[in-house]
Amino acid sequence: MTVFNHDAWAPRIRHLVDEILEIEKRISSRIIEDSPYHFELHNIKYDLKPTSVKKPMDREYALFAKGYVDLATDSPAEDVSIEYERALTGERYKWQTQVQHKTYAARQIAEEMYARLEEAQDPDDPNPKMRTVYTDQFSVERLEGIVVKSLKNIGAREATESMKQKFLQSLGTLRRKASENVRYTPDVNQYFTVSTRDRQADSVSAAELRNTKTLFYTDQTRETLVEEQIEFFDEITEAGSGFKVASVMNRHDFKTPLNVAIAASEPERKFIRDLIKPENARHYDAWLKSTDARFYDIDYAWKKGEHPKRGKFNPDFFIKSAHLIIVVEIKGDEELNDPSEENRKKNEYAVAHFERVNAHLQEEGSPIRYKFTFLTERGFNKLFQSLRDGKIAGFRSDLDVKLAEEL
């Protein structure tokens, strides 16, 4: 085929041709049967039954029904590692420091919350009681008690800027209207276990490795590949190949039963990069990158427009740390501003799912417990800080809190 084009189009056409020619070149990510990093996972099969949930709201809103505000884990001091690359030479180097965040006393936050309550009241309301309905219920002292309890729940003594904003956002319900939702109630059908050995193989193409996906490998990966993939593996791992690949320098930090790990997006690439850092790897036993479907399904339902939908999703990562299995679903930071309804429901059903799993394991006398979190890049460092500090069981990300908010 001959293509007549302007010179400016040549690179794009070359890229298209390369993509077509490389479409059959693939590397498989599969389980190594005799790996020491296998572990068991507990799951539930459900029957989903539809129910209608109405939340009418009249008179004043009932604030702080739980007596506290649900906060995401944060720290006044945070270890930060930044990697730089020189544009001309490609030389890379790291800079590490500790960032001190601005903090607030409980009293300071309580005073700002009280001011917000004053603003929310209508001094001209025809009902005299409504003119001061919120400030009558919540004095500065009572609000201070709520702040103190909220901080205590996550083991904090003072609030960071993000926590302060969360306290103020908790008053946003004053502007919300009544809601009505159609939900599916999960009915437990069967408890069962699945081994990491049951994780099916998946693969990545040359075109994907040039664009969105990244391959993590070790010095032992080559010997695990089938013969027809070795030549392609040598091609993509050659210096300057232009493919998105990452060599794990120490195979002992790659604590997964997979021969390679495929990061499907830039946030996943950064998460795996942090996961295999030596300072983090020493604090867990093993991990697994799940497939997109048919490995660990969690049933959920949501409403798209006027139509109820049902689906299944597979969390991205499972990390085993002693008797705790951390289940991580990775999303982009944009979800923090405006989470989709589908992700809200994924979170709702997943949290309830693992509560049932934990309750079942407790009845069975098993020490294993599960911790589920929705995580964005903003929360990566906080999660691994909590892991290193031995506080991962109580970790909550900013997105966990955002998704749990009532609409």
Image: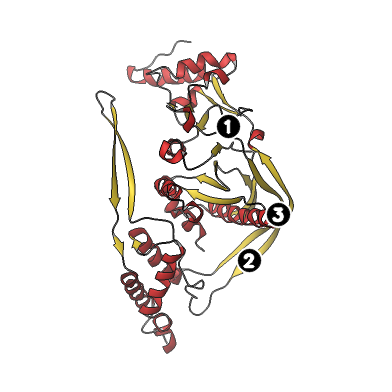
Label 3 close to label 2 by CB (< 8 Å): no
Of callouts 2 and 1, which one flags the residue occurring earlier in the amino acid sequence?
Answer: 2
- Extreme residue toward the top, this view: 2
**Which mark is on residue 186?**
none
Mark 3 and mark 2: span between their CA atoms?
33 Å
Image check: 95 left or right of 212? left
Of callouts 3 and 2, which one flags the residue occurring earlier in the amino acid sequence?
Answer: 2
* Mark 1, residue position: 257
Q: Is residue 92 above or below residue 239?
A: below
| Residue at 55%, 45% in the rendered image | 322
* Mark 2, residue position: 53
Q: Position of residue 290 (x, y in %)?
A: 58, 37
Q: Amino acid at mark 3?
A: Glu
- Extreme residue toward the bottom, this view: 128
Q: Position of residue 186 (x, y in %)?
A: 69, 56
Between marks 3 and 1 in the image, the one whose residue lies nearer the viewer:
3
Q: Is residue 355 above or below residue 42?
A: below
Mark 2 and mark 1: span between their CA atoms?
43 Å
Q: How many marks?
A: 3
Between marks 3 and 2 in the image, the one whose residue lies nearer the viewer:
3
Of callouts 3 and 1, which one flags the residue occurring earlier in the amino acid sequence?
Answer: 1
Mark 3 and mark 1: span between their CA atoms?
27 Å
Q: Label 2: few (<14), some or many (≥20) within 10 Å?
A: few
Which type of secondary structure does the marked residue at label 2 adopt? strand
Q: Label 1: few (<14), some or many (≥20) within 10 Å?
A: many
Looking at the image, can residue 127 be seen?
no
Between marks 2 and 1 in the image, the one whose residue lies nearer the viewer:
1
Looking at the image, can residue 112 be seen?
yes
Label 2 close to label 1 by CB (< 8 Å): no
Q: Position of residue 103 (x, y in %)?
A: 30, 61
Q: Amino acid at mark 2?
A: Val
* Mark 3, residue position: 364
